């Protein structure tokens, strides 16, 4: 089993739980020296950067040399780039897609031939409830998660006949360092000049950091271990579900978005976010 983005949060919890459950786990990160706690649990540390072709090929080669194939791939590595679409630097937007979409897609391409040869395998993509709904200020992040939904749906059909399962795990609000990292990378926080998005950006920043520790949605959130248990369920059942929403926030907001018309969803968002170009009152 190969788990990407294992140095913290969901990836770390998943690698730890699966190792404790008896799986041979290759925990990977760009800096393998950050994986000490997992190697203490029996995980094997691998250097893996999902934006680097040579790094991905080398990591897959290690697992295939030891076991013939990557039996289970957990595509977890990812990050959030927040900010108004107009203000996010396109280099940052491309980096977001390279990590969250093209990295998992390419890594999946690399493991599939050996999975097909052995007649079985599982690809678990860690998506988000953000692949089914969109919060203001997160356009590029949500776009990557919507893309992962589409890739998972296409791949599930294409490889089922080879004995390979494709599963999408959709966490809601998970209490990790995700919010802090997203806030730190937020674009458009200029303190000088005429910034038409200043109030909006400040509101997105407050919402991003606050939703995990206060209010109703915080109480409907969860921990990385909740996602890890969903992954374990998906890879141990003989007929896994296509999607595993994790936490009450994912089920509640996902269901709400499914039934609300677009304009009604926009109105709901306007209650929580300052809409650029408009004043509250």
Image (spheres, rainbow, N blue to C red):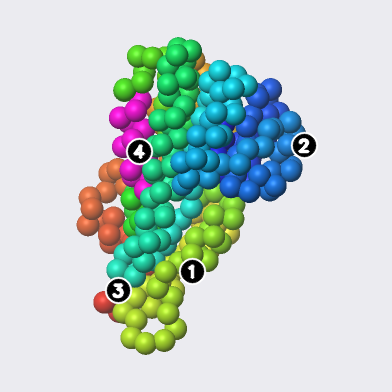
Q: Position of residue 91 (x, y in %)?
A: 38, 61
Q: Nearer the viewer, residue 23 or 214?
A: 23
- Which of the marked residues, 3 or 2, is nearer the chain's N terminus? 2
| Residue drawn at (45%, 66%) of the image | 186
**Screen quadrant of the N terminus:** top right
Asked if residue 146 lies in the magenta stretch, the reply is: yes
| Residue drawn at (30%, 43%) of the image | 258
Image marks 3 and 4: residues in contact by CB distance under 8 Å:
no
Task: Give the foreground label among 2 and 4.
Answer: 2
- Real-space Cα distance between discs 1 and 4? 28 Å
Query: Which contiguous range is marked in magenta?
Result: 144-156
Image marks 2 and 4: residues in contact by CB distance under 8 Å:
no
Task: Give the foreground label among 3 and 4.
Answer: 4
What residue is disc 4 on? 149
- Real-space Cα distance between discs 1 and 3? 16 Å
In the rendered view, tell whether residue 116 sits above or below residue 217: above
What residue is disc 2 on? 40
- Which of the marked residues, 2 or 4, is nearer the chain's N terminus? 2
- Real-space Cα distance between discs 3 and 2? 49 Å
- Which of the marked residues, 1 or 4, is nearer the chain's N terminus? 4
- Which of the marked residues, 1 or 3, is nearer the chain's N terminus? 1
Q: Nearer the viewer, residue 204 or 182?
A: 182
Instruction: Write down the quadrant of residue 93 in the picture.
Output: bottom left
Quick one: label 3, few (<14), some, or many (20+) residues within 10 Å?
few
Residue 206 disc label: 1
| SS type, badge 3 | loop
| SS type, badge 4 | helix
């Amino acid at each position: 089993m190969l788990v990407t983005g294992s140095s913290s949060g969901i990836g770390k919890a998943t690698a730890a739980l699966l190792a404790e459950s008896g799986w041979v786990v290759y925990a990977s990160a760009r800096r393998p020296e950050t994986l000490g706690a997992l190697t203490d649990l029996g995980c094997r540390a691998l250097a893996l950067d999902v934006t680097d072709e040579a790094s991905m090929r080398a990591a897959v080669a290690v697992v295939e040399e030891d076991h013939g194939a990557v039996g289970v791939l957990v595509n977890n590595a990812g990050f959030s780039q927040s900010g108004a679409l107009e203000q996010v630097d396109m280099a940052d937007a491309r980096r977001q897609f390279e990590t969250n979409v093209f990295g998992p897609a390419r890594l999946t391409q690399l493991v599939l031939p050996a999975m097909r040869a052995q007649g079985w395998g599982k690809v678990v993509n860690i998506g988000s409830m953000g692949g089914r709904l969109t919060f203001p200020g997160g356009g590029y992040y949500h776009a990557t998660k919507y893309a992962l939904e589409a890739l998972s749906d296409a791949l599930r059909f294409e490889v089922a006949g080879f004995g390979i399962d494709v599963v999408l795990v959709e966490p809601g609000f998970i209490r990790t360092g995700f919010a802090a990292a997203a806030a730190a990378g937020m674009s458009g926080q200029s303190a000088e000049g005429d910034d038409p998005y200043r109030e909006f950006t400040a509101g997105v920043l407050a919402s991003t950091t606050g939703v995990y520790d206060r209010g109703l949605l915080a109480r409907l959130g969860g921990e990385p271990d909740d996602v890890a248990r969903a992954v374990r369920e998906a890879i141990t059942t003989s007929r896994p579900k296509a999607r595993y929403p994790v936490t009450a926030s994912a089920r509640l907001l996902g269901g709400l978005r499914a039934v609300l018309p677009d304009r009604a969803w926009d109105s709901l968002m306007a209650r929580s976010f300052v809409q650029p170009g408009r004043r509250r009152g």
